[in-house]
Amino acid sequence: MAKMEFANCLVNIGGDAGNQVPKEHVSVAEMAVLRALHGDEAVHTIEPLPVDNVDIHEELDRINAFYGRKEENQKLIRQIFPLASHMPLRLRDLRLPEEFFAAVKRAAPVEAVEEDELDAPIDEEGPAPAPATAADDDFAPINDEISRTPVKTTTRKTGKPKDDIFG
């Protein structure tokens, strides 16, 4: 028996981020196979679990039974693990970037804010800006003075100025 690390993770099937499958209690050896089948970046959002005792020969048999149904996958598994003793036991053996692991902590406000503090101006330059409304998302009408101001432009072919883009 060997001590092997396990984890919960997400797997992008075929490397496609739009086709994710959650996997629970995945051994480090199985992660190596998943990365070989679906791409180096396919296994992500890894949440390490406690170490478990595993018979490495039984784990290799389990991986072969599940992933080795296709002959090409059997060859791949034999390539990754020519012997059961070559099986990785720790997550660090896979040399995964830190970004592949799940975030441990969520961001939270630094301190509680009183309700009346939210209405106070931020600085002495004037009152806080008015809150956005649904109307702010619509296109504003064009200022007539600005829209009638002639604009001098040049043509692309000659480089000579045009008199007015509106005329």
Image (cartoon, helix red, strand yellow):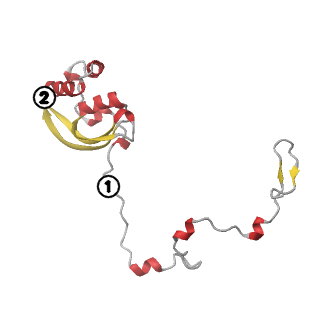
Which is more toward the observer, 101 or 160?
160
Real-space CA distance between mark 2 and mark 1, rounded to the nearest whole angstrom: 34 Å
Which mark is on residue 105?
1
Q: Residue at x 39, y 79 (%)?
A: 115
Residue density around tag 2, few if under 14, some if 14–19, many if 20 or more, within 10 Å: few
Quadrant where the C terminus sits is: bottom right
Which is more toward the observer, 82 or 95?
82
Q: Amino acid at mark 1?
A: Lys
Q: Residue at x 36, y 70 (%)?
A: 111
Q: Position of residue 124 (x, y in %)?
A: 56, 79
| Residue 158 higher or lower than 161, as above or below | above
Residue 56, quarter of the rendered image: top left
Residue 34, quarter of the rendered image: top left
Write down the residue under mark 2: 55
Residue 143, quarter of the rendered image: bottom right
Q: Position of residue 81 (x, y in %)?
A: 25, 22
Residue 59 lies left or right of residue 20; in this view the side is left
Quadrant where the N terminus sits is: top left
Q: Position of residue 125 (x, y in %)?
A: 59, 77
Which mark is on residue 130?
none
> If you read the primary sequence from the N terminus, does the residue marked by circle 2 or circle 1 appear first?
2
Residue density around tag 1, few if under 14, some if 14–19, many if 20 or more, within 10 Å: few
